[in-house]
């Protein structure tokens, strides 16, 4: 007798075990999915750690606002929600800071007008990303308290100490032009600030062109007299410079830096004595010296407009005319432009 398909053992076995096979398959799928989720959760902290951003800031001890921010830890708190941290890297002067920026040791730096000119002429890679308002009274020509020199015009034939190729070099050139003098009418003595102060005090030079806080220190300690400052002659801007790639990739981090600088700068200007008391020991300066210096600087960082780039170009052209830089440069080439 021929058996039907229903009578064959394999068919009955398949029908009776099918639900169990489906159940086992579902359990396996759920186990795999659970394992995948568990692995993902384990790897999540590592992925987040990899995404953390470190902002490396180059600063000088004379940069009072950065010194205050570093000491107070305000920037660290502002960056925390962005999963970003701060590393503060101190440099002795602007040129070394620019070299650090060019070599990738820092992401952002804060310097005066002159160092970026020399750095760009040397082929350094950086971008102007912000600036503080003009502070023309924060640099000046000083003379001893008992000097007979009463005007810039009377500096003709005199020995003048200054830092070669610095902001004050530009100030001296502009003040001489304003008073009918040529560069050849004076005897420049190129010295760094500490050596210039010694030469000034000992009478080896007749005048000293210098910036704060060195100028403020000479005024307070030895009653040096301001012959002329930069008011109406130069701007004396301070610049925030950045590595282009970092700035383009981390706009929120840069904005947080600017926001904190504006907030702390406003507090500083509204509380000069308290700010000076905090900053003075960090700069190894008397409180009254720091307070006088803070009065003459402005702290309100903004993006760099074309008008400020044009002013920086004047400084670059002057340094080229004086043969202080080897080639003419276009400052606008170093201006940062955010992607549209």
Image: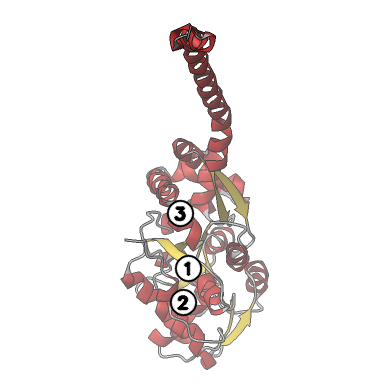
How many marks the image carries: the answer is 3
10 or 225: which is nearer to us? 10
Above or below, comparing residue 119 to residue 180 in the picture: above
Q: Quadrant of residue 337?
A: bottom left
**Nearer the N terminus, badge 2 or badge 3?**
2
Above or below, comparing residue 205 to residue 132 in the picture: below
Q: Residue at x 45, y 12 (%)?
A: 5
Q: Quadrant of residue 310?
A: bottom left
Q: Is the Cβ of the residue at disc 2 closer than 8 Å to that at disc 3?
A: no
Q: Position of residue 91 (x, y in %)?
A: 63, 59
- Determine crowd level at label 3: few under 14, some 14-19, many 20+ residues with C-alpha closer than 10 A: few
**Nearer the N terminus, badge 2 or badge 1?**
1
Question: Residue beneath label 3, please?
Answer: 249
313 or 139: which is nearer to us? 313
Q: Position of residue 94 (x, y in %)?
A: 58, 65
- Determine crowd level at label 2: few under 14, some 14-19, many 20+ residues with C-alpha closer than 10 A: many
Q: Which mark is residue 187?
A: none
Question: Residue beneath label 1, please?
Answer: 139
Image depth: mark 1 or mark 3 in front: 3
The span from disc 2 to disc 3 (Cα, nearest Å) is 37 Å
Please give left or right for residue 291 compared with residue 96 in the image. left
The span from disc 1 to disc 3 (Cα, nearest Å) is 36 Å
Question: Which type of secondary structure does the marked residue at label 1 adopt?
Answer: strand
Quadrant in which the C terminus appears: bottom left
**Nearer the N terminus, badge 1 or badge 3?**
1
Q: Position of residue 320 (x, y in %)?
A: 50, 86
Question: Which type of secondary structure does the marked residue at label 3 adopt?
Answer: helix
Q: Which mark is residue 171?
A: 2
Q: Position of residue 117 (x, y in %)?
A: 51, 75
Q: Residue at x 68, y 70 (%)?
A: 195
């Amino acid at each position: 007798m021929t058996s039907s398909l229903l009578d064959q053992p394999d068919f009955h076995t398949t029908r009776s075990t099918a639900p169990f096979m489906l159940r086992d398959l579902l359990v396996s799928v759920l186990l795999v999915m659970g394992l995948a989720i568990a692995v993902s959760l384990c790897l999540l902290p590592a992925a987040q750690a990899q995404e953390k951003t470190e902002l490396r800031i180059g600063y000088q001890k004379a940069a009072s606002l950065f010194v205050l921010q570093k000491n107070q830890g305000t920037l660290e708190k502002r960056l925390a929600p962005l999963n970003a941290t701060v590393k503060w890297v101190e440099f002795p002067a602007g040129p070394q800071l620019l070299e650090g920026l060019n070599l990738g040791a820092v992401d952002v730096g804060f310097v005066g007008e002159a160092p970026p000119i020399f750095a760009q002429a040397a082929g350094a890679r950086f971008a102007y990303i912000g600036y503080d308002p003009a502070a023309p009274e924060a640099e000046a020509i000083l003379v001893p308290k008992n000097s007979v020199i009463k005007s810039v015009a009377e500096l003709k034939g005199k020995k003048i100490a200054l830092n070669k190729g610095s902001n004050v070099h530009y100030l001296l050139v502009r003040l001489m032009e304003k008073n009918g003098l040529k560069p050849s009418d004076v005897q420049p003595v190129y010295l760094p600030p500490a050596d210039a102060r010694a030469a000034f005090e000992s009478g080896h030079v007749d005048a000293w062109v210098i910036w704060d806080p060195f100028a403020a220190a000479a005024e307070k300690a030895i009653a040096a007299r301001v012959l002329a400052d930069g008011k109406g002659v130069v701007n004396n801007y301070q610049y925030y410079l950045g590595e282009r790639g970092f700035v383009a990739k981390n706009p929120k981090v840069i904005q947080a830096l600017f926001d904190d600088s504006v907030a702390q700068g406003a507090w500083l200007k509204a509380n000069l004595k308290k700010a000076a008391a905090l900053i003075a020991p960090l700069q190894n300066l008397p409180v009254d010296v720091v307070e006088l210096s803070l009065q003459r600087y402005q702290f309100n960082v903004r993006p760099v407009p074309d008008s400020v780039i044009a002013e920086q170009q004047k400084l670059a052209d002057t340094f080229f005319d004086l043969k202080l830089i080897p080639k003419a440069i276009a400052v606008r080439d170093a201006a940062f432009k955010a992607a549209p």
